[in-house]
Image (cartoon, helix red, strand yellow):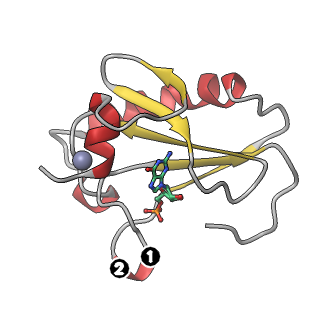
């Protein structure tokens, strides 16, 4: 499948890793929208939050359990925002489920 984040998950395309385990990968966004901007993805391909089902939602729970650890590893100490875009109106640009973790500075009310 021609999916950028599947290629990053498998290591075919390199990324600056923050955290990795068997199921998920976290890496720095290539085009940060704030001081600390990391992404978290499942290693399995799920198109977006709109494709989360009873069958695949375990990995989403796993991502959210890892997020506090990932935020700390990335150097975020004073709070963060977690965002996911799903579908055309959200401007999702990579069609593989990912959560943005944004922090490292006081964020404007609307970002991402
Ligand atoms: P979306 O707009 O789909 O919610 O977010 C996709 C994010 O992926 C964007 O913030 C974009 O900067 C990031 N991105 C796109 N291509 C790459 C890449 O090759 N490497 C990394 N690290 N981030 C990427
Ligand atoms: Zn994918």
State the image quarter where residue 87 is shown: bottom left
Q: Is residue 18 left or right of residue 106?
A: left
Return the residue found at the far front: 13
Measuring 37% from the left and 28% from the top, which residue is drawn there?
24
Which quarter of the rendering shows the C terminus? bottom right
Query: Tag count in the figure?
Result: 2
Q: Give the CA separation, mark 1 to mark 2.
A: 5 Å
Return the residue found at the far bottom: 89
51 or 104: which is nearer to us? 104
Residue 110: give its label. Answer: none
Residue position marked by numbered label 2 in the rendering: 88
Measuring 62% from the left and 22% from the top, which residue is drawn there?
69
What element does badge 1 sit on? loop
State the image quarter where residue 109 is shown: bottom right
Residue 89 location (% of width, % of height): 41, 82
What element does badge 2 sit on? helix
Return the residue found at the far left: 1
Residue position marked by numbered label 1 in the rendering: 91
Please tell me how crowded label 1 is: few (under 14), some (14-19), or many (20+) other residues with Cα within 10 Å. Answer: few
Residue 25 location (% of width, % of height): 42, 30
Look at the numbered discs 1 and 2 and tell me whether their residues touch, using CB distance below 8 Å: yes
Disc 1 CB within 8 Å of nearest ligand 1 atom: yes
Q: From what the image shows, is residue 62 above or below residue 13? A: above
Measuring 39% from the left and 17% from the top, which residue is drawn there?
21
Q: Is residue 26 left or right of residue 94?
A: right
Residue 4 location (% of width, % of height): 30, 50
95 or 11: which is nearer to us? 11
4 or 70: which is nearer to us? 4
Please tell me how crowded label 2 is: few (under 14), some (14-19), or many (20+) other residues with Cα within 10 Å. Answer: few
């Amino acid at each position: 499948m021609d999916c950028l984040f599947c290629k990053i998950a498998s290591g075919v395309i390199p990324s600056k890793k923050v955290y990795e385990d068997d199921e998920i990968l976290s890496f720095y966004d290539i085009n940060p929208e704030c001081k600390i901007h990391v992404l978290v993805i499942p290693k399995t391909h799920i198109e977006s939050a709109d494709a989360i089902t009873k069958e695949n939602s375990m990995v989403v729970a796993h991502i959210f359990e890892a997020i506090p650890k990932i935020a700390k590893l990335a150097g975020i100490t004073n709070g963060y925002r977690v965002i996911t875009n799903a579908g055309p109106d959200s401007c999702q640009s990579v069609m593989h489920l990912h959560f943005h973790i944004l922090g490292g500075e006081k964020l404007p009310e609307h970002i991402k």
